[in-house]
Amino acid sequence: MIMISNRSCPLLYSRNILLAFFMVLFIFFVVSSCGDGSQKTIKSEPIITEASIPVQGMTCGSCEHHIETEVIRKDGVFEIKADHEKAMAVVKYDSSKISLDELVAAINATGYKASLPVISNQ
């Protein structure tokens, strides 16, 4: 009787590796699809809020840009437009992810003086 070793026949060795890989993949998908679904997370809708935050100390477009680039990096901020002529920054954000106090603190961290705003829900 002649026995062919997997090592002596590269084609058989490769086929066995692929077969083992697909078996593991199949088992993974079968196991991950089982269960009662109680582990599903419910993604909540964002609570989009717009706030007009008074900002003192802006004198030019560079000041506006500095505030905008820092605040837009915060998780939950969708849009910000700073205006040095109106001394105001209008921010659209998800109030379930970031608070108004955190927005004011983010602006203050840029070196400008922000205070609590008038809020309007959309």
Image (spheres, rainbow, N blue to C red):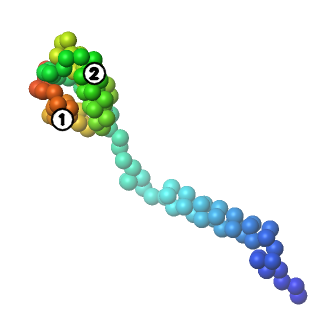
Q: In the visual, does 50 lie left or right of 17?
A: left
Residue neighbourhood size for the residue with mark 2, other residues' Cα within 10 Å, grouped as few (<14), some (14–19), many (≥20): few
Q: Quadrant of residue 113?
A: top left
- Alpha carbon separation for disc pair 1 and 2: 16 Å
Q: Which x, y percent locates residue 23? A: 63, 65
| Relative image position of residue 55 (x, y in whole percent) | 15, 22
Horizontal and vertical percent position of residue 4: 83, 80
Amino acid type, residue under disc 1 in the picture: Ala
Quadrant of the frame with the N terminus: bottom right
In the figure, 71 relative to 5: above or below? Answer: above
Give the residue at x 18% y 35%.
Answer: 109
Please tell me whether residue 85 is drawn above or below residue 90 in the rendered image.
Answer: above
Check whether the beta carbons of the residues at disc 1 and disc 2 lie within 8 A of each other. no
Local secondary structure at mark 1: loop
Q: Is residue 122 above or below residue 3?
A: above
Which residue corresponds to mark 2? 62
Please report the residue visible at 39 percent of the width from the left and 50 percent of the height from the top: 40
Residue 87: numbered disc: none
Residue 92 seen: no
Q: Is residue 79 visible?
A: yes
Quarter that holds the C terminus: top left
- Which residue has dot 1 on it? 109
Helix, strand or loop for disc 2: helix
Other residues around mark 1 within 10 Å, as few (<14) / some (14–19) / many (≥20): some
Say which of 4 and 22 sits in front.
4
Residue at the outermost top position: 85
| Residue at position x 31%, y 29% in the image | 69
